[in-house]
């Protein structure tokens, strides 16, 4: 008896996706609920499990295939892998043309390592002609991450390719193409679409300010051990920024509004999106009703979302909605940027790197830990006065955190 593997329901508005990776080959034994496929949509990556115990007898949708919800991905047949030794051999022959088409036979050892890596890591490995098997893998299930490959490059793993690069140009071109076309993931396509949509639709402007982080750093230093001991989570910056933004949104509701046709929708709830960078792209999980949460609740929720984002386990519900977004480019060292709106929202706050700078305090020059803040906003909804006032309110709350505790 055979059981079909089909694309599961993917949530509202998602009608199809792409087979990103098969974790089993034809002829392999599988167990019910064991993950067989990583299926990528324009928002999340979904693990498709085996519907039955048996042997993977057919792959109907190879990697890179677009399949609609309910579409056929493959077939699981009854039996065990040992009972079907002949099935495994033909499977190898079916897939044999793929490695044979590679530019050089020496790429075969790396291919086995590349099977466990994401598109970004694979591209780096192939561009730098690295041996994937020799690179320590730190990702989930032993996969190579982009960071693993970059670390290998920095430690000298590219010494041989560098030497080859110094050779005459003509031989280098004969050895293989010097550029590679890689199909964009559905997530990357969706990100590109939404960012361009924001630029084309909104009358987007950005206003800037700076905040003295002295008070927040002092609070974290004073209470970090006790906070972590009591709540089981570290006291980070983000909870302060979420609370400060909510204080500003309550005073200036236009920043929490959005356009719908010829109407403005003012929202009396505060679902704050927190942008998280992953190997596959930027995702924005939503901390719902953040105004009702404590500092520890916010830190815990953001921690959970961060782990889910890295593991590709965020659900559609966790990525849907949001009334305002915070993006922290400072974790990557950004000193100043202009964030793009997360439509249909009308405002997004950009955090940046905290850097010590000389500033005027009264009549004295002091060295203070300073951070630039950027608010990008839709001028169709938010006037300049409201945008600037909002950013000043956020600055005031962060420089005097007691305001947040006293709801002032």
Image (cartoon, grey):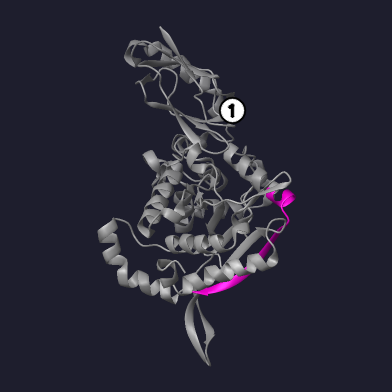
- Taking the spot 53% from the left edge, 31% from the top edge, the residue there is 11
- Taking the spot 57% from the left edge, 46% from the top edge, the residue there is 127
| Range covered by the magenta-colored residues | 198-212
State whether residue 298 is above or below residue 82: below
> Can the viewer see residue 176?
no
- Taking the spot 47% from the left edge, 70% from the top edge, the residue there is 398
The percent coordinates of residue 162 (x first, y second) are 55, 55
Q: Residues within 10 Å of mark 1 (few under 14, many from 20)?
A: many
Residue that numbered label 1 is attached to: 16
**Number of on-image labels:** 1
The percent coordinates of residue 259 (x first, y second) are 68, 48
The percent coordinates of residue 87 (x first, y second) are 42, 13
- Indicate left or right for 263 with 253 as reference: right
Q: Please state which of residues 2 and 306 is positioned toward the viewer in this rendering.
A: 306
Quarter of the figure with residue 392:
bottom right
Q: The N terminus appears in which quarter of the rendering?
A: top left
- Indicate left or right for 221 with 166 as reference: left
Quarter of the figure with residue 337:
bottom right
Is residue 187 highlighted in magenta? no
């Amino acid at each position: 008896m055979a059981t079909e593997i089909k694309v599961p329901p993917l949530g509202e508005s998602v009608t199809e996706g792409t087979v990103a990776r098969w974790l089993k080959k034809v002829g392999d034994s599988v167990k019910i609920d064991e993950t067989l496929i990583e299926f990528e949509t324009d928002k999340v990556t979904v693990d498709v499990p085996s519907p039955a115990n048996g042997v993977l007898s057919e792959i109907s949708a190879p990697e890179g295939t677009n399949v609609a919800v309910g579409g056929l991905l493959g077939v699981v047949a009854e039996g065990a892998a040992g009972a079907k030794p002949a099935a495994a051999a033909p499977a190898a022959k079916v897939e044999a043309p793929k490695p044979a088409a590679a530019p050089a036979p020496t790429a075969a050892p790396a291919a086995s390592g590349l099977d466990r890596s994401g598109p970004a890591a694979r591209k780096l490995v192939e561009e730098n002609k690295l041996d994937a098997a020799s690179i320590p893998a730190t990702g989930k299930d032993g996969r190579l991450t982009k960071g693993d490959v970059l670390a290998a490059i920095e430690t000298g793993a590219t010494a041989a390719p560098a030497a080859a690069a110094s050779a005459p140009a003509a031989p280098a071109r004969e050895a293989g193409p010097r550029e590679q076309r890689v199909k964009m993931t559905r997530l990357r396509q969706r990100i590109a679409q939404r960012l361009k949509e924001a630029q084309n639709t909104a009358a987007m402007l950005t206003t800037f300010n700076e905040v003295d982080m002295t008070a927040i750093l002092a609070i974290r230093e004073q209470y970090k051990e006790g906070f972590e001991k009591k709540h089981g989570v570290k006291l980070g910056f983000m909870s302060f920024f979420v609370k400060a933004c909510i204080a500003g949104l309550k005073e200036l509701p236009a920043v929490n509004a959005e356009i719908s046709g010829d109407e403005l929708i003012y929202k009396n709830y505060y679902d704050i999106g927190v942008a998280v960078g992953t190997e596959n792209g930027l995702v924005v999980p939503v901390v719902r009703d953040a105004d009702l949460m404590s500092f520890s609740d916010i830190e815990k929720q953001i921690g959970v979302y961060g782990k889910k984002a890295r593991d590709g386990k965020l659900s559609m519900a966790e990525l849907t909605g949001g009334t305002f977004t915070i993006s922290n480019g400072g974790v990557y060292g950004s000193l100043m940027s202009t964030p793009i709106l997360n439509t249909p929202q009308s405002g997004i706050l950009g955090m940046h790197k905290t850097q010590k700078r000389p500033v005027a305090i009264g009549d004295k020059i002091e060295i203070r830990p300073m951070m630039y803040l950027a608010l990008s906003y839709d001028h169709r909804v938010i006037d300049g006065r409201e945008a600037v006032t909002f950013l000043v309110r956020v600055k005031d709350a962060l420089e005097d955190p007691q305001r947040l505790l006293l709801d002032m």
